Structure formats: C-alpha cells, structure tokens
C-alpha cells in the first residue's frame, strides 16, 4: 500500500488504528495550509503554536471524525475552533488580527443566518456561478484548492473568480444602498 496515494478520509481511518505513517502523511499534506489559515487570523508565533495543537487534536480526535463529510472540512473546523477558543481565553487577545476581531464582533450582532438572509437579494442579482463561489468560500468555508477542484481550474484561478464574485456582490450591495439615499 502506497500511503501517499490514500485519500485523506482513509488516512484518518488508519490514524484511528494508530498508524504512524498515515498521521505523518496527513500532517505533511495539511501543515502548511493550516499554518497559513491560522496566520491570517493570529500572530505568526500563535499560528505556529495553534498549528501544532491542531494536529494533536486531529490525532486524539480521529475516532470522532464522520466520514460522511470531507476530511479537509473537519481539519479546518478544528483549526477554526482553536482560534475561537484562543479569542475567548483573552490571554493573547492583542495578537489577533484586527480584521478577524471585526469579523468576530460582527458575528455577535448578526447570526450567520440573518447575515445571509440580508445578503440573499443581492446574491440573487449575481450569475449562478458567482453565487455558488461566494457560498462555497464564505458560507461553507471551502478552501481555494477545493473550489478549484470543483471547477477544474487552478487554485490561483479559483481565487480570482471568488474575488470577482465578491466585487460583484459588493457592487450590488452598494447599488442598493445608493438607491435608498
């Protein structure tokens, strides 16, 4: 069995059986992506710490993984929850990036459902592909690599398409706000 050809989901199953090589393979596949994800939300030093904690949690929680969902989503959820936990602790509150603090503050005032409910009329003004891109990226939290796979394009191209869709959404919102003045 060539461990590098096994899916992420199968690797997690092997990790449940204490298969060290499976854990090493999953770690190598995700360590840079998780670190980059965390570094966008917290300081570099804290991102390094949380990356290690994330992989310790992946190892210790492998038996709780539900194979009905993509492994990547489960892994990123663990990382995201670590950031939220760190924010709640308030020990290193100053290390959180301002943008992420604003996102967390905004989420306290509006539930996700309320926010998406407010955006829905604007989203409906966009092309179907742009709607899907925004939902995948910002509602479902999918990474650009995953979006690229769905669209059969490069990750860079997926990032550009999402960026254009977001600009279109911002334009639709601005147009609506301008008509109310």
Image (tube, helix red, strand yellow):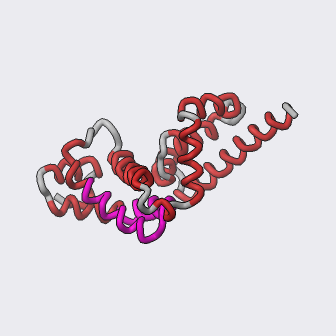
- Quadrant placement of the C terminus: top right
**In this picture, which residue range is highlighted in magenta?**
31-57
Look at 48% across and 59% down and name the residue there.
93
Q: Position of residue 164 (x, y in %)?
A: 68, 49
**Up-down: is 47 above or below 69?**
below
Camera-side residue of 144 and 52? 52
Give yes or no for residue 42 being in the magenta stretch.
Answer: yes
**Up-down: is 36 above or below 66?**
below
Give yes or no for residue 124 being in the magenta stretch.
Answer: no
Q: Position of residue 55 (x, y in %)?
A: 28, 59
Look at 35% across and 43% down and name the residue there.
70
- Quadrant placement of the N terminus: bottom left
Q: Quadrant of residue 106?
A: top right
Left or right of 44 on screen, residue 115: right
| Residue sitting at the far bottom | 45
Left or right of 174 on screen, residue 142: left
Look at 27% across and 38% down and name the residue there.
66
Q: Quadrant of residue 132?
A: top right
């Amino acid at each position: 069995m060539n461990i590098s050809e096994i899916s992420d989901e199968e690797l997690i199953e092997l990790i449940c059986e204490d298969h060290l090589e499976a854990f090493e393979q999953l770690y190598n596949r995700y360590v840079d992506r998780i670190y980059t994800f965390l570094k966008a939300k917290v300081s570099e030093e804290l991102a390094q710490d949380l990356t290690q904690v994330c992989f310790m949690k992946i190892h210790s929680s492998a038996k709780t993984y539900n194979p009905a969902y993509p492994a990547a989503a489960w892994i990123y959820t663990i990382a995201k929850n670590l950031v939220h936990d760190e924010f709640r602790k308030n020990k290193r509150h100053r290390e959180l990036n301002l943008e992420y603090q604003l996102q967390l503050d905004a989420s306290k005032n509006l539930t996700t459902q309320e926010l998406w409910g407010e955006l829905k009329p604007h989203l409906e003004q966009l092309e179907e592909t742009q709607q899907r891109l925004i939902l995948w990226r910002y509602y479902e939290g999918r990474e650009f690599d995953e979006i690229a796979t769905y669209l059969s394009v490069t990750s860079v191209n997926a990032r550009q398409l999402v960026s254009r869709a977001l600009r279109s959404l911002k334009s639709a919102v601005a147009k609506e706000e301008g008509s109310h003045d």
